[in-house]
Amino acid sequence: MKKSVLLIFISIVIFACKSEFEAVRTSNNPELIYQKALEFYDQEDWLKAQTLLELSIPNYRGKTEAEELFLKFAYTHYYNNEFILAAHYFKSFSSTFYNSDKREEAEYMSAYSNYRLSPNPKLDQSYTVKAIEGLQIFINTHPRSERVEECNGLIDEMRRKLEIKAFQQGQLYYNIGQYESAVSSFGNMLIQYPDAVEAEKVRYLMIKATYEFAKKSIYGKKEERYENTVTLYKKFTKKHPSSEYSKEVANIYNNTVEELKKLKA
């Protein structure tokens, strides 16, 4: 019995709160909607605040309250994990309120919202690239900002994701036997990320890939492709003289030299 009474009480409270919100939302009273929007925002009821802020913005356009309303509207999207919309509205705030002392904050939050959209390396990295570009623009625009150090850290983190993505792509080509594509993919990775964590392993796999590719090539292409293996081997030993792969790549090199001797005999 007590449980039933409690449930009824809770239902009445919920209904009452909902009715109050709906009454405000449909009141056509700009001042009431504005005040309640700020109340819900302070209570961190982001969805209700967002709804009422959206209603308030047109009524206060051109007035002093507009700046605060617009920025808080952007934040409600951020706190609701609606990062695509958050990035859009923060950027819109920056361009609309160009002289605002909150402009730097909005530009940072726009880039940071895209950072929050950056997925793990296995997935498409479009938002990672977009976030890096946004954070770099922020650094260039606000070089003295206290957020610059954090932005650089975030950029490093996301560049690492792109490195991993590039490595995984090349490794996939290698694993399925598409050796030419593997070499091309790994080569592009080293151009973009010469100091990548996997650089040594990438060069090692490139040697293996060119060697396997040469072995499977038609006779007329073998010599040229074995020569590519030799070139990569020499670069590898120069870059990594004490590598854990040294013994294996030396064996590949010796086999390659023997094959070239046969081809040139």
Image: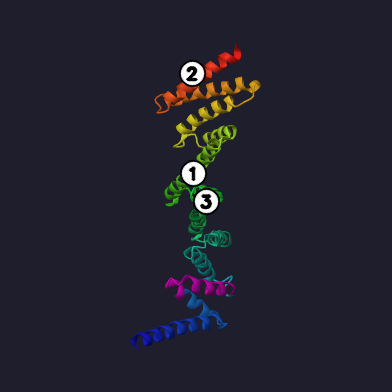
Say which mark, if any, is on residue 4: none
Residue 209 figure quarter: top right
* Alpha carbons under labels 1 and 3: distance apart: 10 Å
Q: CA distance from mark 2 to mark 1?
A: 37 Å
Task: Determine the secondary structure under disc 3.
Answer: helix
Residue corresponding to mark 1: 159
**The magenta stretch spans which residues?**
39-58
Q: Residue at x 58, y 59 (%)?
A: 95
- Which mark lies nearer to you, 3 or 2? 2
**Which residue does the numbered mark 2 point to in the structure image?**
254
152 up-or-down from 170: above or below: below
Q: In the image, what residue type sits under mark 1?
A: Arg
Is residue 54 a member of the stretch shown in magenta?
Answer: yes
At x 49%, y 41%, the residue is 163
Question: At label 2, which amino acid type do we have?
Answer: Asn
Which residue was labeled with disc 3? 131
- Residue 186 image point, x, y percent: 54, 34
* Mark closer to the chain start, 2 or 1: 1
In the image shown, does 126 or 260 lie closer to the viewer? 260
Pointers 2 and 1 in contact (C-beta within 8 Å):
no
Q: Secondary structure at mark 2?
A: helix
Quadrant location, the C terminus = top right
- Of badges 2 and 1, nearer the viewer stands 2
Q: Does label 1 or label 3 sit earlier along the sequence? A: 3
Q: Is residue 26 above or below residue 155?
A: below
The secondary structure that most of the magenta stretch takes on is helix
Task: Report x, y in % for residue 181.
Answer: 59, 35
Single out the residue that lies furthest toward the right: 220
